[in-house]
């Protein structure tokens, strides 16, 4: 992934078409309104119509959340920061993540926009359903909530001053942006950075 010098003001333009450009932006409320009803409906449907017990749902839900945190780390480290050679691949990586590194304070691009987000969610649900069938009705909502927590944390880190008890998380992500882009890949948690030894050193 390559980008120009970090810009703390302004916003990049990704498409000539104004419609396409607007589709690259969103607000957290839009994403919440999409996925919170889905989470609630799937959990209800699993208990009411697919005989999932509350205990099973709770276990799968928490497992889904933990799985998201690992998924987040792997995607950020190995896909979003992948080094590409072809101009087309570079442009795709820039649109996915490079633009965020170049304009880290752009509030409209801190969540994945609705259309690609919905397509990705459908694909992920189908993959999960293929492996665990109707248990996906409990696992996937946990995965989705993990995503919402990640997105909310990401938005907060780039928008607000850190509360005292979360300064380490803020530091981890800001060091990733401004000092050590090859470290600090966890956003909603530093768990996997600790496990895989990619926590930025304090002196950095």
Image: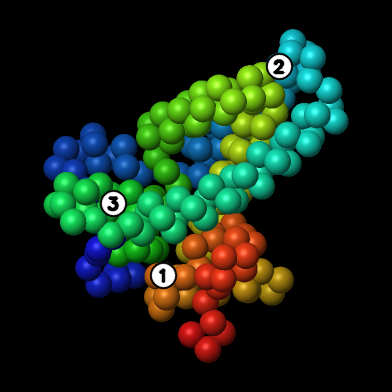
Q: How is the image coloured?
A: rainbow
Q: Which residue is mark 2?
A: 45
Judged by depth in the image, the label closer to the viewer, 2 or 3, is 3
The alpha-carbon separation of the residues under discs 2 and 3 comes to 37 Å
| Residue 201 seen in the current view | yes
Direction bottom: furthest residue: 203
Give yes or no for contact between labels 1 and 3 (Cβ–Cβ under 8 Å): no
Front residue of this view, candidates 65 and 12: 65
Q: Is residue 15 left or right of residue 48?
A: left
Q: Position of residue 175 (x, y in %)?
A: 47, 75
Q: Residue at horizontal 24%, vertical 36%?
A: 20
Rendering coords of residue 187 (x, y %): 54, 59
Q: Which quadrant would residue 138 be assigned to in this image?
A: top right
Q: From the viewer's perspective, is 40 left or right of 186?
A: right
Q: Between residues 39 and 185, which one lies in front from this camera angle?
A: 185
Pointer 1 or 3: first along the chain: 3
For disc 3, the neighbor class at 10 Å (few under 14, some 14 to 19, many from 20) is: many
Q: CA distance from mark 1 to mark 3?
A: 16 Å
Q: How crowded is the residue under tag 2: few (<14 C-alpha within 10 Å), some, or many (20+)?
A: some
Picture residue at 56% right of the left edge, 84% below the top: 202
Camera-side mark, 1 or 2: 1
Q: Earlier in the sequence, mark 2 or mark 3?
A: 2
Residue 90 position (above or below residue 26): below
Residue under the image location 39 percent in, 40 percent down = 113
Disc 1 crowd, CA 10 A, few/some/many (<14, 14-19, 20+): some
Tell me, for residue 93, which label it has, or none. 3
- Figure check: 98 above or below 133: below
- On the image, numbered disc 1 is attached to which residue? 182
Is disc 3 placed on a helix, strand or loop? helix
């Amino acid at each position: 992934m390559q980008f120009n010098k970090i810009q703390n003001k302004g916003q990049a333009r990704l498409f000539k078409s104004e419609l396409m450009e607007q589709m690259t932006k969103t607000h957290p409320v839009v994403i919440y309104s999409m996925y919170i009803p889905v989470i609630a409906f799937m959990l209800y449907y699993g208990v009411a119509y697919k005989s999932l017990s509350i205990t099973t749902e709770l276990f799968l839900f928490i497992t889904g959340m933990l799985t998201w945190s690992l998924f987040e780390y792997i995607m950020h480290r190995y896909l979003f920061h992948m080094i590409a050679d072809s101009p087309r691949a570079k442009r795709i990586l820039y649109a996915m993540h490079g633009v965020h590194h170049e304009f880290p304070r752009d509030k409209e691009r801190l969540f994945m926009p609705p259309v690609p987000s919905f397509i990705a969610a459908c694909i992920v649900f189908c993959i999960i359903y293929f492996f665990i069938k109707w248990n996906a009705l409990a696992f996937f909502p946990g995965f989705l909530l993990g995503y919402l927590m990640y997105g909310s944390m990401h938005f907060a880190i780039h928008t607000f001053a850190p509360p005292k008890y979360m300064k380490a998380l803020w530091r981890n992500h800001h060091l990733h942006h401004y000092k050590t882009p090859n470290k600090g890949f966890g956003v909603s948690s530093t768990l996997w950075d600790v496990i895989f030894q990619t926590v930025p050193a304090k002196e950095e």
